[in-house]
Amino acid sequence: MLVIDVSAKNAILLTGAALNSHSGRIKHEVTTVPYQVVPNQFDQSGPGFAFTSWPNLGRILAVHHSASNEAELDRVIEIAVHEGFHLTGQGGFLRPERTPVRSVQRYPEEAFARYIRHEIMISLSRASAGEPLDAVAYWANELVAKRGSGTLRLIDRIEGSAEYVAALGIAIAEHGCTADDSTLAARALAHASLKWHRWLTDPIRPNEVTEAVVIGLYAGLLLQNSQRGGWQKTVQNGQSLLDLAIEGVTPVPQEINNELLGRIEAIVAARNAETRSHVDALNESLRSPHHVVMSIPAVRIGPAVGPQGIFSYVGDQGKNVEIIPKIRAAPLLGSQGGTLALRDTDVRFEADTPCGSARQLVFPVKRESVTRRSDDRVDVAEQGIEGKDIKVVNRDREGVHWLCVAAD
């Protein structure tokens, strides 16, 4: 893990933990990294993160920040532990083949599924404060009966367990490794309540990923307080934290909150309409002879954020399509690949492109926005897209020109 303090202009590399075969003790190292070797993409205040490559270490997690108080430091610790758990702690998690770690939202979204999941979160938060789990069990059963929850269970396991571990990480950072379980659980619960109280009472942006984070966090804390042995291994082997938390609980029927349901329906309807506008505009431009298509290996996406996340829908010929509306990203093109910045740009993931078999991130660029430096070097300048000296390979398909970014 590379931790970058942007305001202080310093960085440290944490390696470990590796088991020392001679002493049986855990070894780790903290190495100061000269700030000038930190990739330019991480020279921003944050807090933010990206998975990247590092000499002699391979894939690592980079976390950049400008934390100046305890609350901001908590956020840095939370990001580092949550994302670090994705990178290493979930290496042994049972997962269906070809299932990505990241979470994808379905489009068009279903408002009633969002509503039921919100009731599950509210009931779990109340159960964490001492109320019975019967309401949680009822809403969980309703979700399975009306919508199914196979994919959601996987998201809950992956994102929820990482958030649970992150909350405990904050507690350990504050109270130390020798603190007892009850102290750590109380601090983690206090953090959860502070972080998610407003979101639970006012669902401005309901989505599968945030739901998974909240459900897994609260369910994990309930399981920890239950003193149930071996539940972590059961989660690793495929069971969701929610299912384990309500195992053996008798459901008690609950009334539908029509006011909450109406609010969520309005939010989801508006978001579906907005997503459709992005999908239609992106598809039209990608087929247009007035545009070229830029294509980047998806593994090079670098530091990136999409305010609405990744959406998946069924496209032409029944193929699954994934898009990120309004992404902000700084793709990692290597030392000789040039530079590229995307700001509020609609992008799509594709596996079948003229640029090779690797999964690609593609987006349209107006032809007049591309300036050629040479046969294999271009600049790009239009609203939301800024590229300098980008190394490319030229391809054509069905009347559309492709610029395949050749990252080194």
Image (cartoon, rainbow, N blue to C red):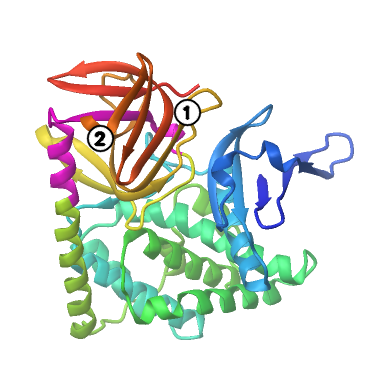
- Asked if marks 2 and 1 touch (Cβ < 8 Å), the reply is no
- Compared to residue 340, the image places residue 252 above or below, namely below
Looking at the image, tell me whether mark 2 or mark 1 is earlier in sequence order: 1
- Magenta residues, as a range? 278-301
Name the residue: 42% across, 26% down: 390
Question: Is the residue marked by circle 2 packed among few (<14), some (14-19), or many (20+) residues within 10 Å?
Answer: many
Q: Secondary structure at mark 2?
A: strand
Q: Which residue is mark 2?
A: 365
Is 78 or 306 nearer to us in this picture? 306
Is 398 or 105 nearer to us in this picture? 398
Picture coordinates of residue 140, whole percent (x, y): 32, 68
The Cα–Cα distance between marks 2 and 1, rounded to whole angstroms, is: 17 Å
Name the residue: 17% across, 73% down: 266
Image quadrant where residue 184 sits: bottom right
Amino acid at dot 2: Val
**Residue 194 horizontal side relative to residue 153, left or right:** right
Is 204 or 26 nearer to us in this picture? 204
Amino acid at dot 1: Gly
**Residue 113 horizontal side relative to residue 198, left or right:** left
Magenta-colored stretch includes residue 294 = yes
Residue 245 visible in the current orientation = yes
Q: Which residue is mark 1?
A: 338
Is 383 or 347 nearer to us in this picture? 383
Name the residue: 65% across, 62% down: 169
Picture coordinates of residue 110, whole percent (x, y): 19, 62
Q: Secondary structure at mark 1?
A: loop
Picture coordinates of residue 116, whole percent (x, y): 27, 71
**On the rendered image, what quadrant is the N terminus found in?**
top right
Question: Is the residue marked by circle 1 packed among few (<14), some (14-19), or many (20+) residues within 10 Å?
Answer: many
Picture coordinates of residue 106, whole percent (x, y): 24, 52
